[in-house]
Image: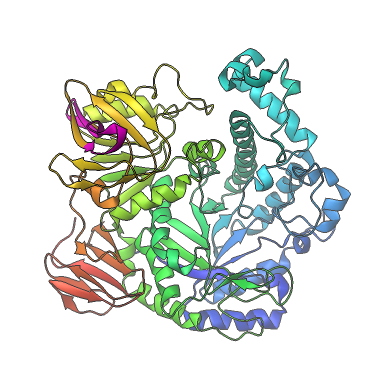
Amino acid sequence: MGKIYLGAAYYPELWDESEVEKDVKRCKELGINCLRIGEFAWGKMEPREGEYSFDWLIKVVDVLHENGISTVMCTPTCTPPRWMLNKYPDMRRVMGDLKKSDVSSRCHICKSSKTAREKNVKIVTEMAKAFSKHSGIIGWQIDNELFPYGDGCYCESCKQGFRSYLKERYGSTEKLNKAWGMARWSLEYDTFDAVEPPYPAQWRHPSLRKAWWDYQCGLIKSFTDEQADILHRYGCKNVGTDMMSNNFLSYYDVNEKLDVVQYNHYEPCARIPQTAFSYDFLRCVKDKPFWVTETQVGWNGSEFAEGGYRPEGACYVNTFLPIAKGAEMNLYWLYRTHPNGHEMGHGALYSSAGRSYRVAEEVKRASGDFLKCAEFLTETKIQSKIALHYSGTAKNSFLVAPLVKNFDYRERLIEIYSAFKHYNVDVIDTAHALDGYEVLVSPFLATLEEHGLKERIIDWVKAGGTWIVGPMSDIMDADVSKYTQAPYSFLEDFAGVYTKYQKPVSNDEFKAKWQDGAQCEIGLCYDAYECKAGTTALALYTAGEFGGLSVAAERVVGKGKVILLGSMLSGENLLRLIDCAPVAQATNNVVLVERSGTQHGIIAVETENKAGRITLDGEYTDLLTGNKLTGGVEIPPYGALVLRKMGKAV
């Protein structure tokens, strides 16, 4: 039987040895079985150049292991010591104003600096030698929250690397100028050496911004891969890197060589339901359980506390939901509040004085509940017939060219995703395989020109899949340029329509109805189609200049079909197009997950702090209480049910 890990980030370098012993005892009282350590402790690991000191940290890992607490060990490359950054200033990132980053907090490093890379290799190698065989360490975290902060580094090394990247990608400035449309405003480059990064103060060209971002993200991948190769060489297991909630930095790319997907999030209490979107995405990156390596246990904060009040039960449900969605670990930031420094306003399980906050009680409750249903959680899987595309390329393309004012790609996807609270659904990037899915939903998928996606989708539809695509999908290439032969690269022909009008402007003029006369709620952008022979108009515009034209069109292709949407549909209207049954009937404040394997059942989590309800189709046992349940069942505010179906295993 597998194990569910519950714990926190801990910084033993800040505390006397006697305090560490007290904290270990507190962990056992709460049922905490995992701590994450080491991520900012380079200064204590290498107090002087080339002199490595790990005895103090080995002792901590020993004590944790002896007390049944596992360790996730972190490489400290996010925070080189001050002496190193001062001695080797080329390690420090150059910001958009061309000033070097001061040594004041963290994330100072230029990812292209040869010195930084050499120093990283040395410290990670020494850590691997010291810790790779320790049985108390169950995994590794590389660096901390890697990201191109401030749009990356603008040093001369990064500039030259960017120019080399462009030369390799385009071959000639003529091809680059054509791909980016640089003839407009007479912006053509004569040489690659003439290309400057998109400095923040300027009106920046979308294609240049996108290319610069791709290059900086590529540096981060190389930076991560380099450390992963060292750790793997020494036999370290479960190597990952903790990433934030967005997909600007591609999860699929960064995790290519890693073993476990790690995730940090600090969503406010009101957005707990939306966190399910991320969990359904993370689970699919490696098709295996993921780790939540950071989430708030009480409130967020830096110099001061923020994030709002979290009522009783919010910590419990914030802990339970990721495990329900396929995580095997949930760690808080942090275990004990820092007594000084940049983040002393952040919440924790314990105060700097070692006194517990109320949320500690909820952590203890979650720990006990996970023990009750550990077999069910670790020996069953989530299988989905529905997939929703969430593209890192689309995220970055719409960042530099949103087309619709204030358009937020991720937030719009989450709006669509909210319709699937009662379905098993996978959220996938474009590199993910399509095998096994019956329905694929691809809204705002800016380009299909990557990973052979266009060809794979065509084959998948012909084999029997239903593809719901649009709006604003297939409208630009990988260089953030629109198509000139048609509004799409191929969707008009594939869906059998002619796009008569397009309006990327929100308004209240356009209305639509389904062919059966029911109201079809639309919004955000408006494409209007004339259907060709063999294509059926599912919904029509009924007002404005688009009256009588189609806003949703369906065409049978082989054994499957494509449904093209010209406007954003409400969740209720989108579900009309989905021929898949929900896990069960439940109120909208309840998230449902169906699990199958050696056992079969449903996890129901109430996420809005109000009573919920689920209607069961047979007899189930609630593994948290032992009660036998059938029919309509109440779920208390911020409550969870783990329901094993009687007599059924798949």
Is 107 above or below relative to 357?
above
Q: Quadrant of the N terminus?
A: bottom left
Q: Position of residue 622 (x, y in %)?
A: 23, 74
Q: Quadrant of residue 40?
A: bottom right
Q: Is residue 49 left or right of residue 169?
A: right
Q: Position of residue 163 (x, y in %)?
A: 70, 25
**Residue 364 sits inside the magenta stretch:** no
- The colour scheme applied to this rendered structure is rainbow
For the point 69% across and 24% down, the residue is 164
**Residue 542 sits inside the magenta stretch:** yes
Q: Looking at the image, can residue 49 be seen?
A: no
Q: Nearer the viewer, residue 422 or 139?
A: 422
Q: Position of residue 111 (x, y in %)?
A: 70, 42
For the point 73% across and 29% down, the residue is 196
Stretch in magenta: 540-561
Is 394 above or below relative to 263?
above
Q: Quadrant of the C terminus?
A: bottom left
Q: Nearer the viewer, residue 632 or 595?
A: 632
Q: Is residue 540 left or right of residue 307?
A: left
For the point 16% across and 77% down, the residue is 628
Q: Position of residue 161 (x, y in %)?
A: 71, 30
Is 91 above or below relative to 381?
above
Q: Is residue 288 left or right of residue 234?
A: left
Is 529 above or below relative to 330?
above
Q: Residue furthest right?
A: 87
